[in-house]
Image: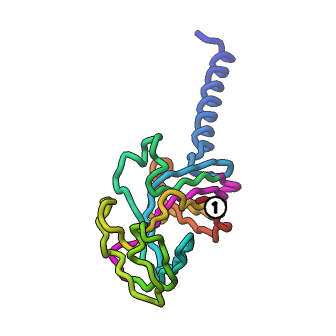
Amino acid sequence: MFPKYSIKFIILIGIITQTIAAQETIKADKFTSHNKGKFYFFWGGNRDSYTKSDIHFTGQNYDFTVYDAVADDKPKGWHIDYINPGSMTIPQTNFRMGYFINDHYNISLGLDHMKYVLRQYQIANVSGNINLPSTDDGSIYNGVYNNTPVNFFDNYTGDDTSATFPFLTFEHTDGLNYINTEFCRVDDISSIFKIGNTDKFQLCFVVYYPRFPYIQHA
C-alpha cells in the first residue's frame, strides 16, 4: 500500500499532465492563421488579348505603317512544355515570387511571357513606301501606299517558303517579356463560406495595387 504522500504526488502529476496537454491543444494555430514572414511562388500559363495597334516598320528600302492591325496570342493549351524543365519557358507563362511583410500585405517580383502574332486573315490600311530590289521576292509590293487597304492573306501559304510571299507576316513571340513588381493585400474569407479547416482549403480576397512600371526585355 502506497504512503499517503505518494498517492498525492501521483495524482498531482496526472493533473499537471492533463493541464499541459489541454493548453497545448488550445495554443496550436493553423498554418494559415498567419502569413507574416512567408514566401510564396506560382507558375502557370496565360491567355492574352490585344487592342488594335499601329505598327511602324522601317529598314533598308522600306518605311511604312500598318494601321489598326489586329493580333492574337499563341497558346499551347494543355501541353507537357508547361512542366518540362527543358522547355517550360517556351509557352505563354507567368512566374511570380513574393514575401508577406505582415499577415495581409505582400510584395512580389514577376515575369510575364506573352506572344503577339499579327492576324493573317485581315485587311488593314498601310501608308508609306516600299522599294525593294527587283531580285527580292517582296518587290512585287513595291510602291507608295497612302492609307491603302492591304489584304494580308493574299499569297499566304503558311510555312511554304517556295510560294509567293504575302505582304507581311509578323510576330513577337520569343522576347515579349515583362518584369514587374507588385504590392497586394490578402484577406481570408473562408469563414463566410463556413470553411473550417483552412489548412486544407482556403478562400482569399486579393486586392492588387497598380504594378510598378514594367521593364520589357525583348
Q: Tell me which amino acid carries mark 1.
A: Asn
Report the magenta stretch's main SS. strand
Task: Specify whether 143 is left or right of 209.
Answer: left
Residue positioned 47% across, 78% down in the render:
51
Of 98 and 140, nearer the camera is: 140
Q: Residue furthest top?
A: 1
Residue located beneath label 1 in the image:
180
**Which quarter of the rendered picture does the C terminus lie within?**
bottom right
Q: In the image, what residue occupies the spot 31% across and 60% down? A: 162
Looking at the image, is 192 positioned above or below residue 54? above
Depth check, front residue: 204 or 85: 85
Q: Position of residue 14 (x, y in %)?
A: 60, 26
Which residue is at a point 31% across and 69% down the rendered structure image? 156
Span highlighted in magenta in the image:
99-123
Indicate the position of residue 161 as horizontal and vertical percent values: 33, 60
**Membership of 139 in magenta stretch:** no
* Residue projecting furthest to the front: 134
- Residue 103 in magenta? yes
